[in-house]
Amino acid sequence: KSVLSLRGLKKAFSGQTVLADFSLDISHGEFVTLLGPSGCGKTTLLRLVAGFETPDDGAVFLDGTDISQLPPEKRQVNTVFQSYALFPHMTVFDNVAFGLRLKKMKGKVLAERVRQVLVQVKMREFADRYPGELSGGQQQRVAIARAIVNTPRVLLLDEPLSALDARLRREMQMELKRLQRELGIAFILVTHDQEEALSMSDRVIVMQDGRIAQIGTPREVYEDPANLYVARFIGDINLFPGKVTECIGENELQVDVFGKSVQARTKKKLQTGQQVLLLLRPEDLRLTENTQEEMPIFHGAIMERSYRGSTLDTTIHLDDGPVVRACEFFDEDDPDFDYRVGERVKVSWVRGWE
Ligand code: ADP
Ligand code: MG
């Protein structure tokens, strides 16, 4: 059963549609990310759920009850903002206690609850500090503590990690996952970072212009993107133009790509003779010396080669036209390791699909 249901939400600002007929069900304890470029309506959607905006049409249900008309403080939904929005003149303790005091909690019960939550976010020793005395990551923890202290049904997080540097950000990603598991409440995290979405979520919701482009597990959206928009947005892709020469069974195809016959798979109903684009991730392509491979081989020249620690990225300009990117696990003993920019190479692929 869903903890949160959004039904046909619509929102426009001065005639400009920002959300168009948005529907979504989120299960209790689920970790969901909203992924999409700036301006696609992510924050607006969270504000509708939290009650800071009212929908032009549609409704928000929490545990089956329509909460569309309730003010934010009457909804069991809290938000963590990117800006932290802590009260600068209050200690960490008072920041976290704020919401509980509004609900008339006090004394030992209040102190015990605040302590408990500060332990959960690993900020217990900082109870008497002021926000100005804390690092960005520590302020973020306090903001999270304040948002979970009155045990909401759903926690909304609007790009909470985007101001942090890369290392701290990865650390906080793992912290958020741990917290969510411990608390067992639904998290909806907004991000425009595809790696963050893939690594953290039970389900990813890819948004495009106020609509859902695809909902799926991280693997589904990465390995089976619903369309070119999703494929491009989630990770790098290589596109090879082709023509269907044979349809084999349910979803297997034989495709002609630059005069070579290759196998591909698809979920669409396609016909012989149809023009298609084959989509390959960088890790599906590799450089090879072996000309006897089963997979097709394309010739080209290296444009760029960059060492990335565990992988080696190569950009290749194929003689047939496209510029493609191959991402291979780094292996010093590999005879292909020493390729230089400008050098002629052969590119093979591991798999492909339309
Ligand atoms: P995102 O969070 O995905 O970047 P937003 O939901 O903030 O996107 O904004 C989506 C669109 O709605 C943008 O074009 C933005 O300018 C517009 N918008 C958001 N809030 C308002 C508002 N209060 N008044 C007018 N336009 C708004
Ligand atoms: Mg936003």
Image (tube, rainbow, N blue to C red):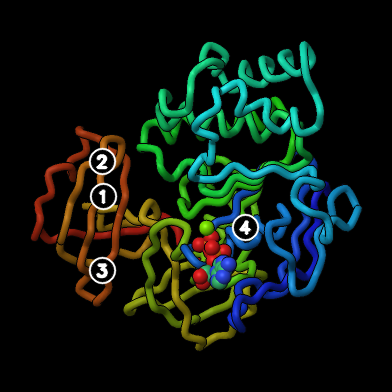
Q: How many marks?
A: 4
Identity of the amino acid at label 4? Ile
Identity of the amino acid at label 2? Arg
Q: Nearer the viewer, residue 134 or 175?
A: 134
Q: Using residue 123 as the reference point, say whether residue 134 is left or right of it.
A: left
Foreground: disc 1 or disc 4:
4
Pointer 4 residue: 205
Q: Nearer the viewer, residue 175 or 227?
A: 175
Q: Are marks 2 and 4 in contact (CB under 8 Å)?
A: no
Foreground: disc 2 or disc 3:
2
Residue shown at 70% from the left, 60% from the top: 48
Q: Would you place residue 237 above or below residue 241 in this image?
A: above
Q: Earlier in the sequence, mark 2 or mark 4?
A: 4
Under 8 Å from ligand 1: the CB of mark 4? no
Residue projecting furthest to the right: 65
Pointer 2 residue: 308
Pointer 3 residue: 323
Q: Are marks 2 and 1 in contact (CB under 8 Å)?
A: yes
Q: Is residue 143 visible?
A: yes
Q: Secondary structure at mark 4?
A: strand
Q: Using residue 201 as the reference point, say whether residue 103 is left or right of it.
A: right
Q: Are marks 1 and 3 in contact (CB under 8 Å)?
A: no
**Residue 54: quarter of image:** bottom right
Q: Earlier in the sequence, mark 2 or mark 3?
A: 2
CA separation, marks 2 and 3? 20 Å
Identity of the amino acid at label 1? Asp
CA separation, marks 1 and 4? 28 Å
Residue shown at 62% from the left, 57% from the top: 205
Identity of the amino acid at label 3? Val
Q: Nearer the viewer, residue 88 or 121?
A: 88
Pointer 1 residue: 313
Q: Are marks 1 and 4 in contact (CB under 8 Å)?
A: no
